[in-house]
Amino acid sequence: MFKGDASAQTFVNEKKAVWEQTQVLSTFKGRADEFDALFYPGGHGPMFDLVDDADSIAVIEEFAAKGKVVAAVCHGPIVFVNAKRANGKALLAERDVTGFSNAEEDAVDMSKYMPFLLEDRIKAVGGNYKKAEQPWGELVLVQDGGKLITGQNPASAKGVGEAILKAIST
């Protein structure tokens, strides 16, 4: 799908160490001060393995508590649904958030394979789910002065990256 995207191809060809030398998620607990941001990419995987992962939730909560940027795109925002703020309130509660929409999941005929739908789970924890006017449209939402960034789908990935860069540069 991204064979014609020059920036995607550059990343694939020049940054292999990113996925070839990936560290176990638990090794990042207690290390938020070493990083500017935490980013979760999409794909269906997070819907099954990261949504309830205690290490992932702990890392997200640590970054958020320290005022670091937490960001995700496509199915990635599902990782935030079980995270809490320091006051115990859901991280996404009362915040405008996006991620892969129910309509997009239906369009690719994957809804029947999902343990739940991302849009529904965001709403269930009190998030104000937003989506582009049309399925597959780009939508990036920036909340809390750039500390919470979400993108709806693959078309939103570049915009999420740009929002992260802007947030950590200010």
Image (cartoon, helix red, strand yellow):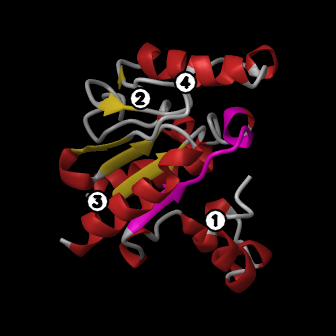
First to last magenta residue range: 37-47
Q: How many marks?
A: 4
Cβ atoms under marks 2 and 4 closer than 8 Å: yes
Callouts 1 and 3 close, C-beta under 8 Å: no
Q: Is residue 4 within the magenta segment?
A: no
Q: Nearer the viewer, mark 1 or mark 2?
A: 1
Q: Tell me if residue 39 comes above or below residue 117 in the rendering.
A: below
Mark 4 residue type: Ser
Q: Are marks 1 and 2 in contact (CB under 8 Å)?
A: no
In the image shown, does 4 or 142 lie closer to the viewer?
Answer: 4
Q: CA distance from mark 1 to mark 2?
A: 22 Å
Q: Which residue, given by chain and number where applicable, does mark 3 sit on?
A: 66
* Quarter of the image where one finds residue 150: top left
Query: Where does residue 166 sit, x and y in percent of width and height?
Result: 27, 66
Disc 4: CA contacts within 10 A as few (<14), some (14-19) or many (>=20): many
> Is 119 positioned to the left or the right of 91 in the image?
right
Q: Gap in Å between the C-alphas at discs 3 and 4?
A: 30 Å
Residue on which the image places disc 1: 5
**3 or 4: tag closer to the N-terminus:** 3
Q: Quadrant of the C terminus?
A: bottom left
Residue at image position (45%, 14%) is 124
Separation (CA) of disc 1 from disc 4: 23 Å
Disc ID at residue 101: 4
Q: Amino acid at mark 2?
A: Ala
Mark 2 lies on a secondary structure that is: loop
Q: CA distance from mark 2 to mark 4?
A: 9 Å
> Decide: marks 1, 4 in contact (CB < 8 A)?
no
Q: Which mark is residue 132?
A: 2
Q: Residues within 10 Å of mark 1 (few under 14, many from 20)?
A: few
Q: Between marks 2 and 3, how big is the CA–CA gap?
A: 30 Å
Q: Nearer the viewer, residue 23 or 3?
A: 3
Q: Secondary structure at mark 3?
A: loop
